[in-house]
Image (cartoon, coloured by chain):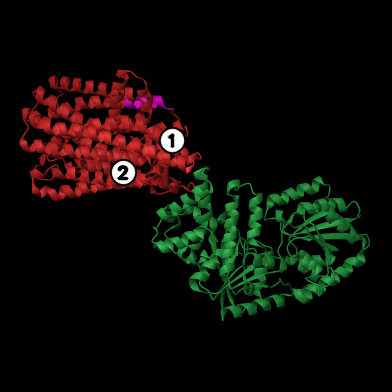
């Protein structure tokens, strides 16, 4: 995510309203990305299937849970690598070494595919579901993972248009496929409807994944001479980036995973456990923070980038201390102003949602407890997204340690609080998400404040004295993998 | 007793003046145990010992200055206000601030060098100095200058050093800095011997160098004077080899009662027995006992040989010394030899056993631009060979005598980097063989009276026991 917003500045210089709208739409893809898409698709599928009728309730549930699992776990498995890969690509773009892109995509794809395959086998080992269904869901699981990976690369290449196109086309094929297979189902021995639904949905996912991969291969030179696992070196070089990626993605989902094991958890087909009540509440609540991420990408990055560039320009290109300090003041002023603006707008929107959701959700027929969970989770989502913004800013200033600590605190707080609050029952659902987000957000805010106060000190002291090659476990793994595969 | 010698950029990795002196000192005092702290620039620049280590030299502790580049952030400072002030006084080159050295050298107090530079108090000090010194100049450049000035020093001070009954540093600079700190920390006596004047040498180097950004030259020069003066104040005795350096040391602040002169000494009894095999008709061999490095200014010697060989038929010039220390310079000398058409005149013998070669040499030449008290000159004098030396270090004192009680000249002194003057003396030497004989005698007499190894060793033996008890 980091660094991509800068190109948007160009987009926004053109004063057309339509252009502006398009850029906002693209920006939401970049910032909120996989996470929003997951939540959105599951909500949409659920809604459509319920409206459509004619689908057996148990079959629908099985299908929806399968897809949720695919989204959640693919994101944890592939999202963790995201920042390391982005940093690797950014550094190589800077050196104009575009030829690493295709091999790197191949490398990370294989890695995540292998991890996903192992995870699928372990997960389905004792499951009574038919083999065909298991294979189908494993395929969807892996394809979704590939989509998240391709998006990292394509946003780096600014192919926003093609990403939207691929999702639209994939969505259309999914809907079409599902409708077609519901009316003319293929004869499966058991779980016929669920398998047909999965198949139809999988077709769309396949279309999206294929389109993204094709565009990717076409946009970058396809010379294969560099090591596809070279990015693993960056895991050794910046282990904190891997930590940020995994802790953040785990933190976002951890409270769901733990609550599944509680009394509200439902187990179906002796395979999937989930909490219909909690999961849909959280999914819904998470959708409320799309504006903040869009606002951050557009407003903070475009406003702030110029000032940021001036500051680092003075630091490295012979500015006097006075110039550096003045640039720092201007930069931090803009940053705080923009952060305040994002917080204010999103805060108002969330507040509005908190008030409105009572009437809105009751009309949709939701229970009181669920509305409470939605409200609490909306606050949790708000704090989580503000925390994510702080993490991204820390990464701009190379405070990787601060970013890793924030993500680690987020994950730890949510895990511990969810476990602690679980025995208190349903009235306390959503509290851990809220409190974890609040704690991590507060910590990140203080860290950022203190870090920026002495940003010039940190910047000078951290200038590495000498380039030192870090070779660790991941680097060696990458080299071995290159030799074997 | 256990004596730790602190040596910078010399023994046992480099052969030549200071290193031979150390080898001589250590092997002549088998009753004491010696350890060496060898400060070198970087791991890459040292290769193999150039000396066979004497049995009483039990350990060599290597310290590599450039290892500071690998420093990590590490521990945070834990200094009281007064302690921090004392440390900053040292960083500000304040007189008498070396009492803070043990504090700077203690990572549990000062913190790691990097963390200390990051600390608020140091950063304020840095910004303050910058604002006073050059507020209109690139802060980044200023910061890097500070970094390369202070990080190595703090890094050195924070290394672990052996304990001893006596620390003996063979220069000021970084070795002297370490010794000063150890003196402050343990109260162990500290002797300082300077062959040249370290701060002066650095000053000349910095003024001529291209790698120091001109606005920072003054600061760097001041820095090395700061190191030297600190060592002068901390040392129990400061020893020079001859009057010239003694006077400069006194000017720079060595108290009179702690300053003394102990000249070099060489193995007179062996060398004076060497026969003179010169005098074959028509043959004239000039020799140079010298490492092939720029400071020895071999090129001036070659130009002088070019001029002299027009007047001296069958002249030979033997350049006797290791060529591997600065291979580029050696190649340059070879090329110059060819360009001057001196292939038939000049021979590069490499390192040779001097006892075999000295008897055949008619006149020895030293063309250095900088020297302390060169052992080679003393050895040549002991063997009865007359000299032509540039007027550097203690050469004039060696060839012409210290005072009126020490009469007789053992050779000619010429200005450095002056091939014509050197060639004139070479021709003069060739013309008057009787003079040469007389000069050889004068040289032998002088060495036997003042520069014998037993005198030199005895002086140090006495000094050691005097400062330790």
Tell me, yes or no, if residue A120 can be seen here: no
Name the residue nearer the viewer: A105 or A264.
A264
Classify mark 2: helix, strand or loop. Answer: helix
> Residue B93: where, in percent of width, then height?
54, 59
Quadrant assignment, res A196: top left
Along the viewing direction, whichever of A31 and A185 lies nearer the viewer: A31
Looking at the image, tell me whether mark 1 or mark 2 is earlier in sequence order: 2
Are callouts 1 and 2 both on one chain? Answer: yes
* Residue B394 on the magenta span: no
Between label 1 and label 2, give the one nearer the viewer: 1
Residue A310 in sight in this render? yes
Where is residue B362? Give x, y as percent.
86, 63
Q: What number is the disc on residue A310? A: 1
Which residue lies at the image location 15% right of the left edge and 31% below the top edge? Answer: A352
Please identify which colour was used for chain B in the image.
Answer: green
Tag 2 residue: A244
- Indicate the colour of chain A: red
Q: CA distance from mark 1 to mark 2?
A: 28 Å
Q: Residue at x 48, y 46 (%)?
A: A467
Q: Is residue A212 magenta?
A: yes
Give the dominant element type of the magenta stretch: helix, strand or loop: helix
Crowd around label 2: few <14 · some 14–19 · many ≥20 (10 Å): many
Residue B263 located left or right of residue A153? right
At which x and y percent is residue B316? 85, 57
The span shown in magenta is A211-220
């Amino acid at each position: 995510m980091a660094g991509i917003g800068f190109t948007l500045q160009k987009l926004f210089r053109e004063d057309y309203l339509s252009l502006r709208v398009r850029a906002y739409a693209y920006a939401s893809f970049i910032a909120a990305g996989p996470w929003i898409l997951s939540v959105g698709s599951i909500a949409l599928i659920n809604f459509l299937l319920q409206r459509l009728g004619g689908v057996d309730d148990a079959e629908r549930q099985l299908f929806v849970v399968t897809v949720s699992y695919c989204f959640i776990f693919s994101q944890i498995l592939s999202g963790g690598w995201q920042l390391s890969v982005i940093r690797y690509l950014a550094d190589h773009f800077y050196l104009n070494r575009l030829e690493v892109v295709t091999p790197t995509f191949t490398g990370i794809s294989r890695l995540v595919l292998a991890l996903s395959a192992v995870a699928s086998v372990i997960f389905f080992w004792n499951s009574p579901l038919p083999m065909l269904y298991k294979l189908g869901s494993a395929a969807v699981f892996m394809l979704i993972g590939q989509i998240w990976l391709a998006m990292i690369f394509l946003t780096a290449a600014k192919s926003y248009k093609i990403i939207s196109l691929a999702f639209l086309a994939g969505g259309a094929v999914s809907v079409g496929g599902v409708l077609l297979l519901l009316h003319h189902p293929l004869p499966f021995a058991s779980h016929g409807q669920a398998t047909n639904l999965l198949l139809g949905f999988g077709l769309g996912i396949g279309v999206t994944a294929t389109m993204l991969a094709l565009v990717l291969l076409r946009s970058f030179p396809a010379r294969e001479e560099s090591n596809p696992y070279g990015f693993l070196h960056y895991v050794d070089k910046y282990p904190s980036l891997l930590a940020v990626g995994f802790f953040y993605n785990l933190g976002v989902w951890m409270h769901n995973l733990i609550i599944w094991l509680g009394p509200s958890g439902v187990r179906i087909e002796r395979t999937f456990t989930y909490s219909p009540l909690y999961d849909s509440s959280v999914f819904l609540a998470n959708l409320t923070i799309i504006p903040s991420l869009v606002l951050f990408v557009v407003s903070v990055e475009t406003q702030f980038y110029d000032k940021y560039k001036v500051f680092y320009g003075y630091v490295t290109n012979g500015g006097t201390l006075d110039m550096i300090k003045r640039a720092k003041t201007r930069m931090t002023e803009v940053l705080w102003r923009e952060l305040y603006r994002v917080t204010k707008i999103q805060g108002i929107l969330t507040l509005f949602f908190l008030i409105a959701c009572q009437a809105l959700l009751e009309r949709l027929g939701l229970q009181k407890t669920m509305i409470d969970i939605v409200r609490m989770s909306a606050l949790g989502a708000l704090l989580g997204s503000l925390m994510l913004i702080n993490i991204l800013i820390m990464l701009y200033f190379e405070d990787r340690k601060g970013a890793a600590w924030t993500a680690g605190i987020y994950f730890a707080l949510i895990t511990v609080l969810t476990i602690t609050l679980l025995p208190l029952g349903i009235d306390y659902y959503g509290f851990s998400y809220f409190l974890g987000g609040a704690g991590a957000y507060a910590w990140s805010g203080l860290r950022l404040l203190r870090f920026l106060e002495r940003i010039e000190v940190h910047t000078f002291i951290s200038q590495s004295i000498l380039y030192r090659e870090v070779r660790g476990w991941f680097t060696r793994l990458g080299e071995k993998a290159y030799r074997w595969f | 007793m256990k004596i730790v010698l602190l040596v910078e950029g010399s023994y046992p990795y480099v052969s030549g003046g200071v290193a031979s002196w150390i080898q001589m000192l250590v092997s002549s005092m088998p009753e004491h145990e010696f350890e060496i702290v060898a400060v070198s620039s970087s791991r890459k620049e040292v290769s193999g010992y150039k000396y066979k280590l004497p049995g009483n030299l039990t350990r060599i502790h290597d310290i590599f200055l450039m290892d500071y580049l690998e420093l990590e952030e590490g521990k945070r400072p834990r200094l009281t206000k007064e302690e921090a002030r004392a440390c900053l006084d040292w960083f500000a080159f304040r007189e008498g601030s070396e009492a803070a050295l043990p504090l700077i050298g203690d990572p549990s107090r000062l913190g790691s060098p990097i963390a200390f530079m990051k600390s608020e108090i140091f950063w304020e000090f840095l910004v303050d100095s910058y604002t006073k010194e050059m507020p209109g100049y690139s802060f980044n450049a200023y910061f890097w200058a500070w970094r390369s000035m202070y990080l190595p020093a703090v890094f050195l001070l924070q290394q672990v050093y052996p304990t001893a009954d006596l620390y003996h540093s063979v220069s000021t600079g970084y070795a002297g800095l370490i010794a000063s700190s150890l003196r402050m920390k343990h109260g162990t006596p500290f002797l300082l011997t300077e062959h040249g004047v370290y701060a002066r040498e650095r000053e000349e180097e910095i003024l001529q160098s291209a790698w120091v950004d001109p606005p920072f030259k003054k600061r760097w020069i001041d820095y090395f004077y700061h190191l030297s003066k600190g060592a002068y104040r901390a040392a129990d005795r400061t020893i020079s080899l001859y009057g010239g350096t003694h006077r400069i040391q006194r000017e720079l602040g060595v108290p009179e009662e702690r300053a003394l002169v102990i000249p070099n000494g060489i193995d007179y009894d062996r060398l004076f027995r060497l026969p003179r095999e010169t005098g074959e008709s028509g043959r004239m061999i000039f020799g140079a006992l010298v490492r092939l490095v720029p400071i020895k200014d071999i090129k001036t010697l070659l130009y002088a040989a070019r001029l002299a060989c027009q007047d001296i038929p069958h002249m030979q010039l033997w350049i006797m010394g290791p060529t591997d220390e600065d291979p580029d310079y050696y190649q340059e000398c070879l090329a110059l030899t060819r360009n001057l058409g001196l292939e038939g005149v000049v021979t590069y013998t490499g390192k040779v056993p001097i006892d075999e070669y000295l008897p055949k040499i008619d006149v020895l030449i030293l063309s250095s631009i900088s020297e302390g008290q060169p052992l080679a000159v003393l050895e040549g004098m002991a063997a009865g060979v007359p000299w032509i030396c540039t007027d550097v270090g203690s050469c004039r004192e060696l060839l012409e005598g210290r005072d009126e009680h020490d009469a007789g000249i053992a050779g000619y002194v010429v200005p450095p980097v002056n091939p014509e003057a050197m060639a004139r003396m070479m021709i003069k030497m060739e013309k008057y063989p009787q003079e040469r004989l007389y000069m050889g005698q004068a040289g032998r007499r002088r060495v036997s009276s003042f520069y014998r190894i037993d005198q030199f060793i005895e002086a140090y033996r006495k000094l050691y026991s005097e400062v330790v008890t």
